[in-house]
Amino acid sequence: MKIEFKMIYTSDTHGRVTAYDFMKKSYGPFGLSRLNQYLNEMKEPYLLIDNGDFLQGSPLLDVTRKEKISQPVAKVFNQMGYQYVTVGNHDFNFGLDYLNQFESQFKGEILCANLFRDGKPYFKTHAIHEIKGIKIALIGLVTEYIPIWERQENIPALEFKDVVEVTRNLIQTHELKTNADLIVVMYHGGYEQNPSTHEPYGQKTVENKGYQLFEIPEIDILLTGHQHVPQIHTRNHRLTMQTSHNASNAGVVHIEMEKDQGRYRLINIQPELISLGAYPVDLSIESVVQDEIKRTETYLSKFVGTLETDMTIHSPLSARVKKHPLFQLINHIQMEYTGAQISCSSLPNDTHGLPTSVTLNDIFVSFPFENDLVVLEVTGKQVMEALELNATYFDINGDEIVVNRKFLHPKVEHYNYDVYDGIDYEIHVGKPIGSRVQHVLINNQHMDLHKTYTLALNSYRSTGSGGFDMFKEATIIKQYPVSYVELISQYIEKHPNLKLDVMNNVHVIK
């Protein structure tokens, strides 16, 4: 007897429960309300799950959280019939109380096997879900890198254990291969190596262990996320895949199983990534958060100030080959706020800069991620090492400076290039990697490799993320729990006709 069903999963939706685009003030090609139209057309039974990072990243969530209006993600998940979710790193950005509030309002279950407190799992580790008599074991996991990124007060006494070891033990301890017909792992993490070609993806850290997880033979389906790189890999009737982010697509797995000697066995598995922009907006889902959308629009429409300096960004490369004024604005704010001698800033991949007339919405769109402001005590040697790593962002193709392929594949990482103020320096792209940075000056004197300096930067970079391990060895002088939206909006309000004299302190030379 053959039984068919589907598994639909989303990951890294970052609050895009609605298809409404607050910047364009119209519907965009994303959003869970579009996915609901796909679900309405389903004829087979299905399992609907989410892979984490659903509580952060959208102005809708920022406004509803600050004004304590509602939990829009829980409302939409419930309306759509999500049955299980695991948590992502950004779901801890606002502390356990906020995450627990979501759990109390969500009608499904949170699964996370490697998150512990006081020696016990904080959430349910796994579940056995039945579809037409078929038993599906679902295991939730989250990246172990969270304690490195997250403020300790947001993850009090939480322990993030090795996802591979936890999964192996759980499968054996609960005899899941015997007690279930299918084992599915929901992992909010990515791949450290390509599961098909075995090609390493950058430096190996505990952040991503999808390759190692897929090496566990008992796992039939491994669903990943976090890296935002859509991909599908199959091996011997086994599957691992990853969706993109911001609810732009969803993973769909068509599964066929057959009963053989009293047990169901997997006979066919067909994965696909569907573009949610191909489906119409489901207004029944939009109506669930209509009040929240209106409140958010009103909040975001607040006028902040006028810029007399052009801060629009036309391309990521052009903004970095020639220092863009938005980098300087952030650095100036960081140095003024902290009193640090040096500042470095980075910009998200999709930042288009700021228009002449700035609203809160413009700032939210350009700075969607939660980061604190940090001041480190660093040596001149550590600054030089960081600058050399930054210099690897560039490459030469023919007669042109281009972006190094490593910053574009497997994941786009324009955000891992920093621009510094407080120092002058040159990057000679044509020179070998490791010896590209020259003439580094501070206060018109050559930087002393043995001397210490104060450096202001965002919390993501201060933890060494992006391969900047030299900052792990630095001393944290102070951490400011303030959002960049707040920092930038307050600064522009104080300077309503802001004009920057852009410092020509960074020279990228072919």
Image (cartoon, grey):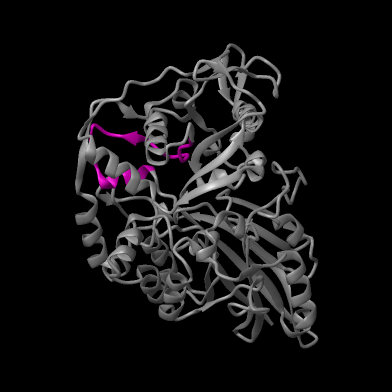
Is residue 269 shown above or below 116? Answer: above
Total marks placed: 0
User: Residue 376: where, in percent of width, then height?
Assistant: 55, 42
Residue that appears at 22% across and 41% down: 493
Is residue 97 shown above or below 238? Answer: below
Residue that appears at 25% across and 58% down: 296
User: Residue 324: where, in percent of width, then height?
Assistant: 41, 26
User: Residue 99: where, in percent of width, then height?
Assistant: 46, 71
User: What is the span of residues highlighted in magenta in the rendered image?
Assistant: 345-366
The foreground one among 45 and 33 is: 33
The foreground one among 481 and 319 is: 481
The foreground one among 419 and 76 is: 419
Describe residue 406's horizontal placement relative to residue 503 as left or right: right
User: Residue 262: where, in percent of width, then height?
Assistant: 77, 88
**Residue 363 is covered by the magenta coloring:** yes
Describe residue 259's horizontal placement relative to residue 366 as left or right: right
Using the rendered image of the protein, determine whether residue 81 is visible from the camera's viewpoint.
no
| Quadrant the N terminus occupies | bottom right
- Residue with the most extreme front position: 451
The foreground one among 80 and 438 is: 438
